[in-house]
Amino acid sequence: MGSTIGLLASFAALICGLLFFVCAVKYYASILIALATLGKEKQGDSEEKGEGMDDWRDTPLVSIHLPFYNEANVARRVIQACLAQDYPNLEVLVADDSRDDTIEILKDPGWRRRPPVVKFIHRRDRSGFKGGALSEALRFMDPRAEFVVVFDADFIPPPDTVRKFIRKFREEDPTLLGTDFLPDLQQVASLRKPVAAVQGYQLHYLNKSENWVTRGIRAEFSGSYMVERVAEERLGAMKMISGSVFMLRADVLRELKWGKSITEDWELTIRLYREGYRVSYTPLIQAPAEMPTTIRALAKQRMRWAEGHTHAVRRHFLGVLGSAKLTAAEKLEFLYFAPYYLQSVMLLAGTAFWLLAEVNHRYPWFWQPAFGWSLLLSNLLATPLMCLAGLWLEGDLRSDYQGAFSLVALTYILAPFQGYAALRGLLEREEGGWVRTLKTGSVTDMFLSLRLRGLLRWLTLGGRLSRFSPVFDLPAINLPVRALLAATSLILLMLPPATALALVIHA
Amino acid sequence: MTRCYTINEKSVYIYATAGDSLIDLHAIPAGIGLFSAEVPWRLSPWVAVSEEAPEEGLRVVEMLLKAEGYRKVEADRVALEDYFVRGDERVLPVQAPVIEESVPLHQWTLDDRPSAQARQTLRRPSRRRRVPKPTPLPRAS
C-alpha cells in the first residue's frame, strides 16, 4: 500500500514539478534578460538631456480617473497628488461608490478653487464594480481628452508621472501626438503594432516595513515589475494592464469601453490585444502605493484576482489563440498567463508529493532522487531569486532582501486560496462579487525619488534614444552582484536538465 | 447669469458662471438626501447635479438656494450636461428664461419661510455660519 502511494506521489510530483519548471524557466530567463539589459548606461547620462522631448507642440488633455470605494483614509492624499502634477492640461475625475466619510472629503470646496478641474461622480450602488465606476468616469470625461490615466486610491503619483507617460507615448508612437521630430522613430513605430496603453510600475512601497507580509509583497512586486515585465517588454510579449498607474488612449477606450469583470484590467488587456493593439511597459514611471498588511486581506485580494483572471482566460482563450492580430510571442505569453494563479498550487502540490515519495522511497524506474531534489530546488528558488534581482536593480537589496524569504512563505500559504479561486473562475458561469482591499493610509517608508539603477537601453528601441536616459543617483553598479545573480540563475535553470542528463549517462 | 438652478424631473442642476463660486455642498443638509450616499450625484467646479432627488429634498433645497441668491431658470438638460462635462459656459443659453427670481432672505414673508420640518433640517452649524442673520420681518398690518 505504502509503495503504491509512494509511486503515485512520485508521478504526481514529477508532473507538478515539470509544469512549474516551465514557469521557472521563464523566471530564470527573465532574470538573465533583465540583468543583461538594465543598468548598462554610464553614470552621468541624465534625464535632462531628454528634456528636449518635452518641447512638444501641444499638450493633449489628460483625464486622470480615480475609482473610489470607502477610501476615507487615502482619498485626500491621492487627489492632492493628482492636482500637484506638473503637466499643464489635466482634469481629475473621481468615480466614487463610497458609503463612508469619503463623501464629505469630496464635497470639500477647496478642490474647486484652482486648476486643474476636479469632477466627482458619486454612484449609489456598485454595479459593474471598479469597471462600472470607470465607465461612469469615461461617460463624464471631457470629450477633448486624448489620454486617460488611472490610479487606485492608495497610490501617490509623483508630480512628473503624467508628463512621463506622455513622453513614453511619444517614444512609442510619435505620430500619435502630432510631432514631427525624429523621423527615423516614426518609421520604426509605423512597423509596430499601435500602442494603446502604457503601464507604469506599481511601486508597493509605502508600508513595506510594517510586517513580514508587506515585506514579502514588496519583494514580489519588485521581481514582477523590475524583472518579469522588463523581459516581456524586451521580447515583445503580451503585457498586462494592472489596474493602476497606466495611461490609455482615450479614443481606444471610448471604442472598447470598460468591462464589468472583477479583474477589469486583465479583461481589457485581452480585448486590446485581440483588436490589434499592444501595451507597453516602463519601470521608469513609478507611483508608490501601500500593501495589504494581513494574510486575510491578501488572500481575499488574490482570490479575486485569481477568479477574475481565470474566468477571463476561459472566455477569451480560443479567441486569443485563434486571432491573427496577436504575434506568436504574445500568444505564448498568454499561455503563460493562463494558469498564472495555479502556479503556486503546482509548487505546493509538487513539494508535498515529492516529500511523500521520499518518505516511502518509491520512484519510477527512470527517475532518481537526485533529479527530484534538483527539480524542487530549481522551482523553489525561481521566484525568490527573481525578487532579489528586482530589488538589486532598484538599489534596495540590502534593505529589503528579507522580503524574498517572506514571499516563499506567502506562496505556500496563499496557494490553496488562489487555487480554489482559480478553479472557481474556470468553472463558474458568472464571476463572484468584488472583495475590497482596505487601504489604511499607513506610511512606514517614504518614497523620495527614483532610485533605479541605470536602465533605459531596452526601453528606447535598441539604444537609439539612449541619450534620454534617466538620472542615476546611485554609485557605480556593483558588477559582482550582477554576475552572482546571473550565475545563480543560470545554474538553477540548468540544474534539473543537467541532473537528468547525468543520470541517463550514468545509467 | 451667475448663480442658477434648474429642476428637471427628479434632477436638480445647481450651477454658477462667470467666475462665481458654486455653493458649498456642506451647506446643503445631508438629511434632505440630495448629496448623500444613497442618491447618485455629481460635482464639478461649475455644476452640482443631484439625480433622483426626493421631492421634499427638492423643496428644501430650492428654499436654500433662493436664500443663497440663486435664480431658478429653465435650461436644456443637454446643455447643462455639456456644461458639466466641458465647463464651457457658452453652451448655456445666453438669456435663459428666469422662472422665478430669488428672494433674498430678509424679504421672505411669513408664508415663504421654510416649514418647521425644513427649518429643523436647515438648522445645522455650517448653515448658521454661512447665512447672514436675517433682519427682523416687518409686522403684518
Image (tube, rainbow, N blue to C red):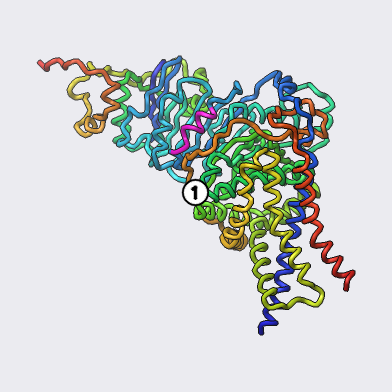
Q: Please tell me in which quadrant of the rendered image residue A90 appears.
A: top right
Q: Quadrant of the C terminus of chain A?
A: bottom right
Where A50 sits versus A293, above or below? above
* Left or right: A298, with B117 as reference point: right
Give how far across and how far down residue A216 sits, in percent: 59, 49
Front-most of A420 and A412? A412
Q: Quadrant of the N terminus of chain A?
A: bottom right
Residue A80 drawn in magenta: yes
Instruction: Specify few, some or many for label 1: CA neighbours under 10 Å numbering under 14, 14-19, or 20 or more.
Output: few
Residue name at image x 65 percent, y 66 percent: A349
Instruction: Name the side, left or right, on which B3 lies relative to A201.
Output: left
Q: Which residue type does callout 1 highlight?
A: Arg
Q: What residue do we see at 86% from left, 65% from top? A: A501
Q: Residue at x 78, y 67 (%)?
A: A371
Which residue lies under the disc numbered 1?
A436
Q: Position of residue A109 (x, y in %)?
A: 41, 25
Task: Please tell me in which quadrant of the rendered image residue A376 appears.
Answer: bottom right
